[in-house]
Amino acid sequence: MNSLLYIQYPSWIHPEIFPGVPFLSLLRWYGLMYIFAFTTAYFVLKRQVKEGALNTEGYEATEDDIFSFIACGIVFLLIGARVFSTLVYDTSGLYLRKPWLIFWPFDTETHRFTGLAGMSYHGGFIGGLIGMIVWCAWHKKPFGKWIDAMSVAIPLGYTFGRIGNFMNGELFGRITTMPWGIVFPHAERIPASLDWVKPFVESIGMTLYEGQRSVNLPRHPSQLYEAFFEGIFLFIILWNLRKRKPFDGFIGCCYAIGYGLVRFVIEYFREPDSDLGFRLSKDGSQVLYTNTSLLNISTGQIFCFIMIALGTAMMIFLAVRNKKKSGLLSKAEKIKDSEN
């Protein structure tokens, strides 16, 4: 008999921190992870302030600046993430018919508290960016410096968001024979009658019982892939680039490009939303628990491609503008020297 080459999702993990305890059952890991994320981003941003990353001639960033900047970004981020999730990823049309439900934290049928279930990263990215721009414009601060500093702070905080998804047992990946594959309790069960299922099951040491109609197969823990590569890995890169940037706005562009590239690749391991499927499919397949072609493209990959394209275009624009600005300053200095 083969040894087990997969992991059962831990039965002790629940979305609630204190499941079954009155009132305390309202506390959820996902919400707590958001608090950890914003707190982490705050301390990383504060560290950069101490390094003088946000100082300009005659001005030093203050504690109040950091709080109000992050608070403004968070408010816009949450609005963008929720609106994007309900209007782009929801196919029922419910939120178009009843837009007031977008920010309604209770189940419409059971009236049970659910929080704001359903948040979109790309919507949060757009909302957070708008929030940071609004704050900088209102307080007359340089966009590039502040967005660069926040771009360094975001990935490490983002790690906690994906850990929250794992604790919820959601956003899991496609089926795999890798020994770290996890059987998630809420994953789609695969019909046992399919020709490839029995050999697959035998290869990982799983047992199919006589008469069993379906089986829950191991999945890539894509939430943890994202937590590491879109979080820790990207943070390390940006942290080491922060003092080497050639112009303001460079780190922000690197974040958009870097996140887009990493997420685009990980999407091949993550199962797309069942009601959306593949937006582009070379072979016409809509079997989502596996991917038969690299040209089967999900909604997330389309948004990642847009992030990469816009990040690259902005980096080129800023580089050209910075070069022209440097040239003008150099010319002005030469004229001043000649006059002296």
Image (cartoon, grey):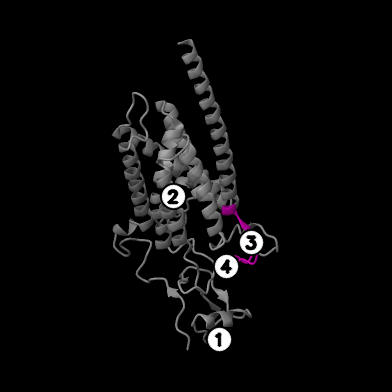
Q: Residue at x 34, y 51 (%)?
A: 36
Q: Which mark is residue 289?
A: 4
Looking at the rendered image, the disc whose residue lies closer to the viewer, 4 or 2, is 2
Tell me the chief SS of the magenta region. loop
Comparing 335 with 123, the one in front is: 335
Answer with left or right where residue 154 lies relative to residue 311. Answer: left
Looking at the rendered image, the disc whose residue lies closer to the viewer, 3 or 1, is 3
Where is residue 112? Give x, y as percent: 40, 57
Residue sitting at the far top: 339
Q: Earlier in the sequence, mark 3 or mark 1?
A: 1
Residue sitting at the far right: 283
Q: Which mark is residue 294?
A: 3
Give the spatial CA distance, label 3 vs label 4: 14 Å
Using the image, determine if residue 55 lies above or below residue 14.
above
Task: Name the quadrant containing residue 53.
Answer: top left
Give the spatial CA distance, label 2 vs label 1: 52 Å
Q: Are marks 2 and 3 in contact (CB under 8 Å)?
A: no
Q: What amino acid does circle 3 point to?
A: Leu
Where is residue 144? Give x, y as percent: 46, 34
Q: What amino acid does circle 2 point to?
A: Ile
Circle 2 residue? 237
For disc 1, the neighbor class at 10 Å (few under 14, some 14 to 19, many from 20) is: few
Looking at the rendered image, the disc whose residue lies closer to the viewer, 3 or 4, is 3
SS of the residue under disc 4 = loop
The stretch of residues the image draws in magenta is: 286-301
Comparing 194 with 140, the one in front is: 140
SS of the residue under disc 3 = loop
For disc 3, the neighbor class at 10 Å (few under 14, some 14 to 19, many from 20) is: few
Q: Residue at x 29, y 60 (%)?
A: 22
